[in-house]
Amino acid sequence: MKIALAQINPTVGDFSGNLTTMLRFVERAAHADAELVIFPELSICGYPPADLLEKPAFVERAQQVLEELAQGAAAFGITVLCGYPSPAPLSTGKHVYNSAAVLSEGTVAFVQSKRLLPFYDVFDEQRYFAPATAQQVFEIAGERVAITICEDAWNDKSFWETRRYQVDPIEELMRSGGVPQGSEPPSLILNISASPYWRGKHATREAMLAAIARRYERPVVMVNQVGGNDSLLFDGTSLALNRRGEVAARALSCVEDMVFFDTATETGMIRPAIDDEDGLVVEALAMGVRDYIRKCGFRQVLIGLSGGIDSALVAAIAVQALGAENVIGIGMPSDYSSTGSIDDSRELARNLGIRFELVPIAPMFASFTTALAPLFDGAAADLTEENLQSRIRGTLLMAASNKWNALVLTTGNKSEMATGYCTLYGDMVGALAVIGDVMKTEVYRLCRFINRERAIIPEAILTKPPSAELRPGQLDSDSLPDYEHLDPVLAAYVEHYETADEIAEATALDRKEVARVLKLVERSEYKRQQAAPVLKVTEKAFGMGRRFPIAAKAQV
């Protein structure tokens, strides 16, 4: 059987648009003489649909579109496997299953629902879906296939040291439990996925699927969603592996793609991989920006260019995502901004080919301080005046956003968001936190990657000491440990929940300094819960996958 792996980028709730895309891929697959075309998990409605699943009209529309897809595929004489939300009996206590449907000759020939429903990190599937209690092998074009959905493949006891579930759906399908009495076991394992990206995830996914192929001596085909949906980035990188666990087909990362796999020869199309993980992070972030802007109905973005490295990286990613004509940089210098920072912003804008506007904030800051003088009579200047400058800049950016119908991209990195080294309603103002899951030291590394062929980001930006430039001679190191020492502490605490003692033993900071950093993290939760959505590129990002109370005693 010739299989088409249709790696598409659905928009959540855009049933008409998703159907159009799927029919386009169906036609391509049929013209290439494929007998089966496979789409990702919940491809009919897009993943994750979240509370839209609670709306009966949403589920009904998914059913209608599934039937329309079946009719459309029948016109091309091809079988389809795709994901959709199917109604669940009231006795399950849920409205829907997360299901995979086989569409053949204009009808829904077979439905298999997901058994393992993840409920950790960004996943919330137990909130919405009823788990399948049974599964069956189904025959497609003479092949007996085991059909699984994403997490169903992530519980192989021979691969994982610790398993999240007692059940292994693939193991059961390969045994008599999933096979009718006296029948042969499946000859092929299929998996439709919406598996989000983070650093190293694609390699883990490939290794896990290869282990399954080797264990059962069966080819494994996995089709993964691609694209950005709010904070979540899906890299695609769909795969087919032969029975020896070798890659026989692979789709591109971070773009829609279709590749083919022949089960008779266990060979297929192998697209080039992005070998540099920093390069893949940049591609994923650009994809996330592009899809967030496009799927929200916008075209242009605004970025406050400070002359610093964070805004430079965000601007470069935005240009890669949207094109230079859709990116506007605004410099907003104060009396504390160095001439070098203004010049660096101009040079960056020239290198990127973007529009650059300069709006000095010194007159506005003077007006604010004059107006506040009676209220603050006798009080010395402090952090209040520093934050005021940041909030003036936020106001200017949002004014331009309203006037030009362009979304503001925030420029804060993960190190700043972790420690609260950012201003609420100031530099945190915006629609999307592009590098909110990128530590400061990683920001430098990604900038070096962007400059690998030519100096897009000026060298002066890469070499100057980090500074918010909100008071004379200010440096980030006045308030925080050097980032090369700070970032390992933050990664250990935020991403791995290590204790202060464990972190002090493993890092360059002493116990007292580690405790100070951890208290900064705990005290800043209120800021993070008011922040723009963060594009997720690590295992633990700020946002929906990391949930902590605001009004709580810090446990460091």
Image: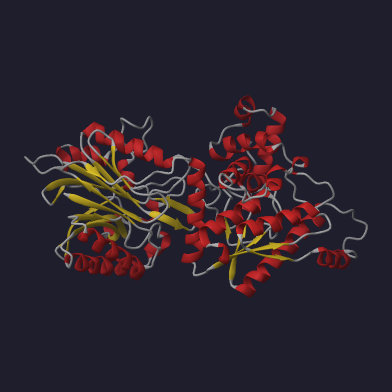
Picture quadrant of residue 332: bottom right
* Residue 267 x/y as whole percent: 23, 42
Task: Spot the residue most to the top.
Answer: 505
Question: Residue visible at 32% across and 65% down?
Answer: 21
Question: Horizontally, is 276 left or right of 145 in the view?
Answer: right
Q: Looking at this view, name the residue that lies furthest to the right.
A: 378
- Location of residue 401 in the rendering, given as x and y in whole percent from the top left corner: 63, 69
As drawn, which residue projects farthest toward the front?
A: 454
Left or right: residue 553 versus residue 82 is right
- Residue 184 falls in which quadrant of the image? top left
Looking at the image, is 3 positioned above or below residue 399?
Answer: above
Quadrant of the rendered structure where residue 40 is? bottom left
Q: Residue furthest bottom?
A: 403
Up/down of 370 relative to 380, above or below: below
Residue 127 is situated, as x and y percent measured from the top left of the image, at 39, 54
Q: Residue at x 56, y 46 (%)?
A: 453
What residue do we see at 17% from left, 43% from top? Answer: 178
**Quadrant location of the C terminus in the rendered image:** top right
Residue 544 visible within the image? no
Residue appearing at x 34%, y 49% in the figure: 251
**In this orientation, which residue lies closer to the viewer: 529 or 25?**
25
Q: Position of residue 339 (x, y in %)?
A: 80, 54
Q: How many marks?
A: 0
Work out whether residue 298 can be spotted. Answer: yes
Q: Colour scheme used in the picture?
A: secondary structure
Residue 99 versus residue 191: which sits nearer the camera?
191
Q: In the figure, is residue 142 to the left or right of 290? A: left
